[in-house]
Image (cartoon, rainbow, N blue to C red):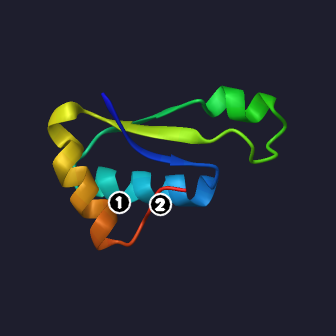
Amino acid sequence: MKELLRSTDPVKLAMATALLEGEGISTFQLDVHTSVLEGSLGILPRRLMVRDSDMFMAQVVLRDNEIKSD
């Protein structure tokens, strides 16, 4: 798996996940529990991961929808 997006914004991550899964690209979020443990202060970013083979298409989907990493 490769890191596609890193963000402290849960709305951005949810939108990116919905767009990608709508295109048939599976995603997985890392650091969710660590982010919650720090008190949701927005200090620790979460990472959105995709399969290596889906990386190019996932980048195209995010670029076309103007979603950028923090």
Report x, y in % for residue 62.
33, 62
Residue 25 or 45: which is nearer the viewer?
A: 45
Q: CA distance from mark 2 to mark 1?
A: 6 Å
Instruction: Indicate the position of residue 11 as horizontal and vertical percent values.
Output: 59, 59
Residue drawn 27% across the image and 55% down it: 59
Q: Horizontal placement of 44 versus 41: left or right? A: left
The tag on residue 19 is: 1
Label 1 element class: helix
Q: Amino acid at mark 1?
A: Leu
The answer to whether marks 2 and 1 mark residues whose Cβ atoms lie closer than 8 Å is yes
Q: Amino acid at mark 2?
A: Met
The residue lying at 22 percent from left, 43 percent from top is 55
- Label 2 neighbour load within 10 Å: few <14, some 14-19, many 20+: some
Between 26 and 9, the one lying in front of the other is 9
Q: Residue furthest left?
A: 53
10 Å crowding of disc 1: few (<14), some (14-19), many (20+): some
* Count of picture labels: 2
Say which mark, if any, is on residue 15: 2
Residue in view at x 69 percent, y 38 percent:
44
Q: Is residue 33 left or right of residue 56?
A: right
Determine whether 11 is above or below 24 in the image.
Answer: below
Q: Position of residue 45 (x, y in %)?
A: 62, 42
